Image (tube, helix red, strand yellow):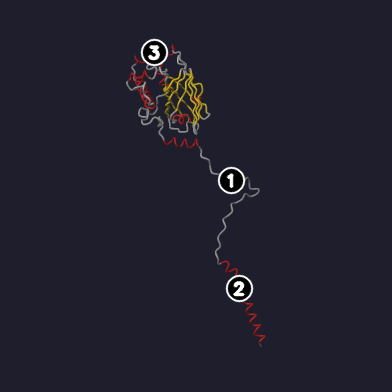
């Protein structure tokens, strides 16, 4: 009898153990385990080349074009010549003071050098002025006034100007030129359409201006840059200039090499004989300019 009870107890224990074993998977399923992150899909063999998706590189040219489209198609100047904008108030669409305009004024005998513009009363204290930005503003304002006079001249006055221009072209012996002009390795000289040098002052100062045509996204762009070379010191046949640049563009393009140079502050140049040189290096701009001013 005792043996029978022990057998029954054994069978009951075995049944409980059997039920516990088979209930373990159900218990395990009731516990939430953290999910493993999905593995990236791998290329399949025979499915073509695998091209990883890389971040797209910003398109400088297209961004420049999109930025430019926000501005009106009119002449703009950099803010280099603070506190006053050089000639922003007098610039209107299609009426930029170009190198061609300034050359025409010179050829017509309306001015010769910077100090000759003082007769208009808009240049003050040229000889003692140390503010090249203000001086350049006054020079360009004076030249623009002359341009307006030229445009509004009567038929008789235009004939007289044309006669003077013919004489100037016949007897002019000055042949200043840009021998080399590179910015960030790009040859700027190849894109210039008109270059003008004023006659030098007694101290060696002069104005250089040039018109430029270039292409952005297969569209023609134009700009005119101005550089006032103001003598600050001399040592025998050598001169040191403080150079004040500025630029007018048909549409603002901050990616223009000349625009970048026009925003450089404290730009200087050295003159030896007839040669004037600018060597400027920074993180964003490397400029190499060589002029032959051929001052008669």
Q: Is any atom of residue 113 visible in this view?
A: yes
Q: Earlier in the sequence, mark 1 or mark 3?
A: 1
- Whether residue 218 is situated above or below residue 205 in the rendered picture: below
Q: Are marks 1 and 3 in contact (CB under 8 Å)?
A: no
> Which image quadrant: the C terminus?
top left
Name of the residue lying farthest toward the front: 235
**Residue situated in front as seen by the camera: 30 or 233:** 233
Q: Residue at 41% of width from left, 35% of height from top?
A: 71
**Residue situated in front as seen by the camera: 268 or 97:** 268
Compared across the picture, whether 184 is left or right of 90 comes to right
**Which mark, by number, is residue 164?**
3
Q: Earlier in the sequence, mark 1 or mark 2?
A: 2
Q: CA distance from mark 1 to mark 2?
A: 51 Å
**Which mark, by number, is residue 52?**
1
Numbered circles on residues, count: 3
Q: Which residue is mark 2?
A: 20
């Amino acid at each position: 009898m005792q043996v029978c009870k022990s057998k029954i107890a054994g069978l009951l224990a075995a049944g409980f153990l059997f039920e516990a074993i088979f209930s373990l998977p159900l218990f395990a399923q009731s516990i939430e385990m953290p999910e493993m992150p999905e593995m990236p899909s791998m290329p399949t063999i025979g499915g073509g080349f695998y091209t990883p998706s890389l971040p797209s590189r910003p398109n400088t040219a297209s961004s420049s074009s999109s930025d430019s489209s926000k501005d009106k198609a009119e002449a703009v100047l950099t803010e280099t010549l603070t506190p006053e904008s050089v000639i922003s108030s007098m610039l209107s669409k299609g009426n930029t003071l170009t190198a061609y305009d300034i050359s025409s004024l010179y050829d017509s005998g309306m001015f010769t050098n910077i100090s000759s513009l003082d007769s208009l009363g808009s240049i003050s204290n040229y000889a003692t002025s140390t503010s090249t930005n203000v001086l350049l503003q006054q020079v360009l304002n004076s030249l623009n006034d002359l341009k307006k006079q030229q445009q509004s001249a009567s038929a008789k006055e235009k004939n007289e100007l044309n006669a003077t221009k013919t004489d100037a072209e016949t007897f002019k012996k000055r042949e200043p030129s840009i021998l080399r002009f590179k910015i960030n390795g790009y040859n700027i000289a190849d894109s210039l359409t008109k270059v003008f040098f004023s006659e030098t002052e007694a101290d060696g100062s002069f104005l250089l201006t040039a018109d430029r045509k270039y292409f952005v996204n297969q569209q023609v762009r134009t700009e005119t840059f101005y550089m006032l070379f103001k003598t600050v010191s001399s040592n025998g046949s050598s001169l040191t200039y403080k150079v004040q640049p500025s630029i007018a563009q048909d549409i603002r393009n901050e990616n223009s090499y000349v625009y970048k140079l026009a925003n450089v502050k404290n730009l200087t140049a050295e003159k030896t004989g007839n040669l004037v040189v600018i060597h400027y290096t920074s993180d964003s701009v490397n400029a190499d300019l060589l002029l032959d001013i051929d001052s008669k």
